[in-house]
Image: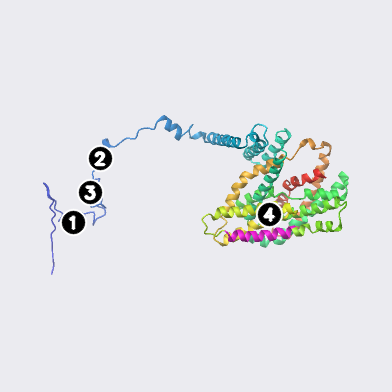
Amino acid sequence: MEVTSSVTLTSVGPAELDISKNIEVSHIYNPSYKPDNPGFNPNCNSTPVTPLPSSNKREKKPPSRIRRIITEPFGPKNLYVLRLLGWVICLLVSWGLLYTLVKEEVAPGGQLLKLLTLIVSAHIAGIIVSHVNLPPLLGMLVTGIVLRNIKFFEVSGTYREIVVTTREIALTVILIKAGLGLDAKALKKLSFVVLKLAFIPCIVEATGAAVCCYFILGMPWVWGFLLGFVLSAVSPAVVVPTLLKLSSEGYGESKGISTMVIAASSLDDIVAISAFGIFLGFATNVGKSDADITNQLLQAPIEISLGVLFGIVWGLISAWLPHKEDKFVVFKRVFMIGGGGLFSVLGSQMIGYNGAGPLSCIISAFVACLCWKWQGWSDSYNPVATAFSGLWLIMQPALFGLIGAEIDLSQIDATQIGQGLIVLAGGLVFRAIACTTCLLGTNLNWKEMIFVNIAWLPKATVQVWRNSTFHVL
C-alpha cells in the first residue's frame, strides 16, 4: 500500500508559509542551497538573524598618543637601542640592590665592584669581537689584561679566593658541557686513539720544551721538565666550546673527531698535572723521604682511578634520581650533575688529587646523559645540556676575563720574550709530530689530522692555575 502525505505548516500571523512543495531545496537536503537572507545560519533551527546595518557598527577609536608610545617606543627600528637601554637599567638596578646590601664593597673602589666590572666588560668585549668574526674569548682575555695593567683590577684577601673559586666553577660548567656532548659510539670506536692522544703528545711536548729550556735558557733538566709539563697541558676551556660548536653544526661528526679530542683533552690535563707534581717533588726533594717520592709517582694512576670511579658512580646516581616522571626532573638533574661536578673539582683539590675532579666531571655527565637517552631523551632534546649552555654564557666572560687579569706585563722581562717564544714553539713542534704519529692508521685524512693538531695547541687554564706555584718557588 502506498502512502502519500502532504505537509502544510501554518504559522500564527498575517501570512502563511507552505513548504509542502519541493522540500528537497531546503538546506537540510541540499548543502549548496543559499537563502536570500545573508544572516541565515543553516546549522541553527531558530529564526535567521538579520545583521545590523553598517551605520550601526561601533567604530574603533584611534589609540591615544601615550598608548602608541608605550606599545611602540621610539619606533620598531630602534630595537637594538631599546635592548641596550634595558640591559643598562638592569645593571643599575642590580648595583642599587647590591649597594643596599653590602654598601662599600660595590661603591667606587670596592673590590666586588671591580670584579663585576671586569666580568661585564669582558662580556661586552666578547660581543664586539664576535661581530668581526673573531673568537669572543679573545676580547675577554684582552679586557682582563687591560684592566689588570691599568691597575683597575687588583683584589686581595677574601676576594682572591672568590676569583679562584669563580674560575673553578666556570671550568666545571664547561667540563660538564663537554661530557654531555660526547658520542658514546664514537668514543667506543676511538678509545685506543684517545689514549694515545692523551699520553704521547703531552709527554713528547714536555720533553721538547725541557730540551729547549736546557740549551736556550740554561735551566737544569728537572726544572726544564717542570716548565715543560706546565706548557704541555691543553686548555679544555678553549678546546671544548669550539669543538662543541663545530659538532652542533655537523662538522667531523661522521668520524667522531670532536668526541675524540674532548675525551683526550681531559686525560691530557691529568697527565700534565700529575707529571708536574712528580718533577716538583724532585725539584724540592730536600728533606723528603723515598715514600714521598713514591707517592708522587703514584699520583697519576690514583687520580685517574678516583676520577673514573667517582664519575661512574655519580653519573649512575644522577640518572636514577630523580625519577624521569618527577615534576622537577630537569632542575634536579641540573643540580645533581652541576653540584656533584663542582664538589669533585673542589674536593679533589682539598685532598691533593687535583686531576681527579675534572675527569670525574666529564665522566659523570657522560654516564648520566647516556642513561637519560635510554630513558627517552635524545640528542635533539636534552634540557640539561641546554641549561649548561646558558650557564656557560654567564661563566665564559668570568673565566677568560679573570685569566687575562692574571697577566701582569710589568713582571715580564722583555729580553727573555724571544727565548720564551722559542721554548713554546719548540714544544709545540714536538707535540705536532707526536700527534700526527698517533693519528696515522686511522680513517682521518690529512686535512682532519691538521685540524686535530691545531685543536691540540691552546693553553690557558692549567697554566694560570700553576702560575701561583711558580710564584711560591
Asked if the residues shown at circle 4 and circle 2 are in contact, with their CB atoms under 8 angstroms apart, the answer is no
How far is disc 3 from disc 2 in space, using C-alphas?
18 Å
Query: How many numbered marks have been drawn onto this rendered protein structure?
Result: 4
The residues colored magenta run 303-321
Asked if the residues shown at circle 1 and circle 3 are in contact, with their CB atoms under 8 angstroms apart, the answer is no
Q: Which mark is residue 52?
A: 2
The residue identified by callout 3 is 35
The residue identified by callout 4 is 344
Q: Amino acid at mark 2?
A: Leu
Instruction: Classify 100 as above or below 358.
Output: above
Q: Amino acid at mark 1?
A: Ile
- The image quadrant of residue 436 is bottom right
The residue identified by callout 1 is 23
318 part of magenta stretch: yes
How far is disc 4 from disc 1 in space, using C-alphas?
85 Å
Lower sequence index among marks 4 and 1 = 1
Instruction: Using the image as rendered, state which of residue 85 and residue 428 is in the foreground.
Output: 85
User: Helix, strand or loop at disc 2?
Assistant: loop
Lower sequence index among marks 3 and 2 = 3
